[in-house]
Amino acid sequence: MGFRKTVAVAIAAIAFISPSFADDVLDFGFEGVRFFDSVIPGGLDLSLTYLGLGLSDAADTKLFLKAGGGYENASLVRDPLTGDPSAAIAGNEYYSPNFQWELAFIQGFSRRDDGDNLLEAFAFYRGRYDIYLNELSESVFSDARGMFGTSVMAGVSYDSRVLSRHRSKEGVYAEATAEWGPGFINEKTDFWRVSGQLRGFLPVYDLPSDGGNLFNVYLAGFLGADYAAGTSVPIYVNESFGGRSLRDSIGNCVRGYGWNKYDTSFKSAATAEVRLVGPAIVLDPIVPYLFGFVDAGYYAGFADSANYSEASGFLASAGGGVALDLVGFAQASFIVGLRLVDDAAVPYAYDADSFFTGVKFFLHF
């Protein structure tokens, strides 16, 4: 399916759904920003949620539409001829104009105190059109120059998270999903994967205030795992954790190792953070953060690799940083840290000094 036809299908879906919506059951959402060179905004994702079906009194029934695109840069940290992880990525870097869309049916089974769904099940249809502007060989990775991808996903989630007026988080989010990209639609995306994650937030201290935040402290934790397989697993699948929202691979979950490195079949990651939230700046939702973190992860199996298909190992790092939350719309942070494990099992290139710095947009989770 060509790019124009893909866009037409997405627009037709929006046009079909939108006219019947009443304002009180229609929710527009901002889902995130795409970045070029990690810091330059290069696109965005928007969503539309319809709450008017009312199939159950116990909780909401939702129809969800998400669409987005951008102009981003990416790289394949593999040898395109052997599939082996590579220390050199010169020549494997490329620009990627892309467009993605999702349609979902979501059924809740219970509510939180604020009225939103606590426990829900969902079914997603996903599509994506990726253009990779390169001349890489497709002998190992059939989507090395781009693809049209289609997949379906089903899962369940539990979400008790709440955000206080003082920008402190509390509660738990848990999710389990299974996704399938059928090869009979496109042989370049013949895969399946299962994913799970757990996030938890625990307030420790909140300095009393009648207005905006003065000072509070809360703990944050993340645990995630992902396994993917198939006859043609796309590059983006190897380089991400699955679920309702894709998350960068273990090389970025464990900070300091490189965002798309360790693009293995199995990956898991864990993070513990303490977050100190400072006084509100001008507006209540604009607050500074100071945080410390410990990250750890385990990887196994580079799919389609001639010599590293059985490689596995552990990663770990620790550090801290400062961040600024701008009304929940954007969060910019600067981090410093140390790689605690020098992984010799895979031939990636790292500085001799294990110290690292970085700039990130949005908190780690």
Image: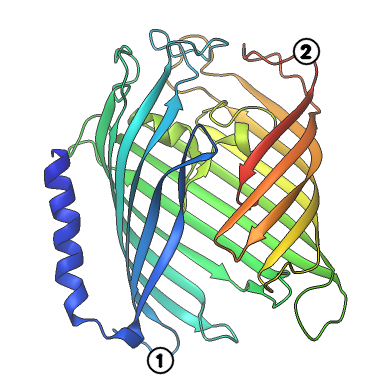
Res 15 visible: yes
Report the residue at 46% width, 80% height from top.
109
Mark 2: secondary structure: loop
User: Would you say 156 lies left or right of 225 here?
Assistant: left
Please name the residue shown 57% across and 85% down the image.
114
- Displayed quadrant of residue 143: top left
Residue 325 in the image, given as x and y percentages of width and height:
66, 59
**Image side of residue 202 versus residue 135, left or right:** right
- Say what secondary structure mark 1 lies in: loop
Mark-to-mark CA distance, 2 and 1: 60 Å
Placement of 1 over or under 347, stated as above or below: below
The residue where tag 1 is placed is 57
The residue nearer to you, when weighing 316 against 37, is 37
Q: Position of residue 238 (x, y in %)?
A: 46, 32
Q: Are marks 2 and 1 in contact (CB under 8 Å)?
A: no
Q: In the image shown, does 190 or 286 lie closer to the viewer?
A: 286
